[in-house]
Image (tube, grey):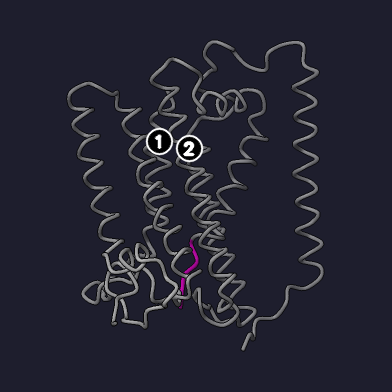
Amino acid sequence: MDDEPLPQSWVVWALGGVAVGFVALLVIAGLALLQSHHPVCNTNFPARRGDYPTYVYVFAAIAMFALGSLTSSVGIRRNRRSQKMLGEGPWTNPAAVVNVNLAVAIFLFLVTILMLIEAWTLGHGVWPITYYVRCSMNAGAFITLIGVASYAFLIGRWMWVFKE
Amino acid sequence: MARRRTGGGSKPGPRKDNEPLWLEWLEQRPVGGVGASVVVAGWLVLWLLYARHVWSLEVTFFVAVALLTFVLGCLSAYAALVQARGAKPNEVLRLPESWKDFENYFRWLTPVAFMFGLIFAHYFWH
């Protein structure tokens, strides 16, 4: 039977707060872009370097990815939770199993579309996704670094969990 | 009628009367192996396209990643479909017995792919 404890209420509230914070950040950034009278970066060829060199982003992402995995493992050990595979314990519900696999499939198809857009734009002289990232790096280096680090942390926490 | 549930070495199970024949046929194929073969064959074609200067290195790289994620997405959708028909999760896309000894090493694929992708894609910063 399911022996997994339910998440504590403060965890739910904290996650809700983070979600609201992200939405607020998106609204603020969207409004700032809409009200801007000047381009936030070079519209022809956004600069390769912003306030920080590119390796700062690369190694920050790798470090946060490892940190995400580490915090996930520590949380599991501290809460003495057994690591259940899909189909075991609380994950025996067929609907949960099907939903997880469908969610993974949708995520992978989304990544496929993004990769094809990147390839097509690179081959046709249109701004690739990379340019938008560079543009955001020029416009707000620190905020972009936080975004990169947060994304890598979440990916590390969710997708690199060691099974004992 | 005995059958295999997955592509890649699976347990036999009873056939459901209402199960479509095409699904029955699909479940008896080594789907995981077919997926891996498609990726390898696709990458060889892409390498040829790059070697013959049809596509640049950047375009080839991103199409290669797209092919990999597309095949993985199809495998995940296949697993969802078969599980929705009643198969247990550990019966779908099982590793062949001869690969079991290497299973612990596969957990390193995620970080290796992430770091390799990040560092290699970083060179396409143009």
Can you give x and y, in whole percent of width and height, for residue A93 in the image? 59, 77
Q: Residue at x 79, y 56 (%)?
A: A16
Query: Relative to B17, does residue A151 appear above or below in the rendering?
Result: above
Query: What is the span of residues highlighted in magenta in the rendered image?
Result: A160-164
Q: Nearer the viewer, residue A33 or B3?
A: B3
Q: Quadrant of the N terminus of chain B?
A: bottom left
Q: Chain of mark 2?
A: A
Can you give x and y, in whole percent of width and height, for residue A30 in the image? 76, 28
Residue flagged by tag 1: what amino acid is it? Answer: Ala
Q: Is A80 on the left or on the right of B27, as rendered?
A: right
Q: Residue at x 21, y 36 (%)?
A: B45
Query: Relative to B114, does residue B101 appear above or below in the rendering?
Result: below
Q: Tell me, for residue A144, which label it has, or none.
A: none
Q: Chain of mark 1?
A: B
Can you give x and y, in whole percent of width and height, for residue B90 in the image? 41, 76
Query: Relative to A88, does residue A99 appear above or below in the rendering?
Result: above
- Dominant secondary structure (helix, strand or loop) of the stretch shown in magenta: loop
Can you give x and y, in whole percent of width and height, for residue B46 in the image? 25, 34
Q: Nearer the viewer, residue A22 or B24?
A: B24
Q: Which residue is mark 1?
A: B121
Work out which residue is located at the far front of the displayed protein and give it.
Answer: B17
Q: Quadrant for residue B101, please give it.
A: bottom left
Does dot 2 land on a helix, a strand or a loop? helix
Q: Which residue is mark 2?
A: A113
Mark 1, residues whose alpha carbon is within 10 Å: few (<14), some, or many (≥20)? some
Q: Residue at x 50, y 77 (%)?
A: A87
Does dot 1 land on a helix, a strand or a loop? helix
Residue flagged by tag 2: what amino acid is it? Answer: Ile
Q: Give the alpha-carbon distance from disc 2 to disc 1, as whole Å.
A: 17 Å
Q: Is A146 on the left or on the right of A160, as rendered?
A: right
Work out which residue is located at the far bottom of the displayed protein and give it.
Answer: A1
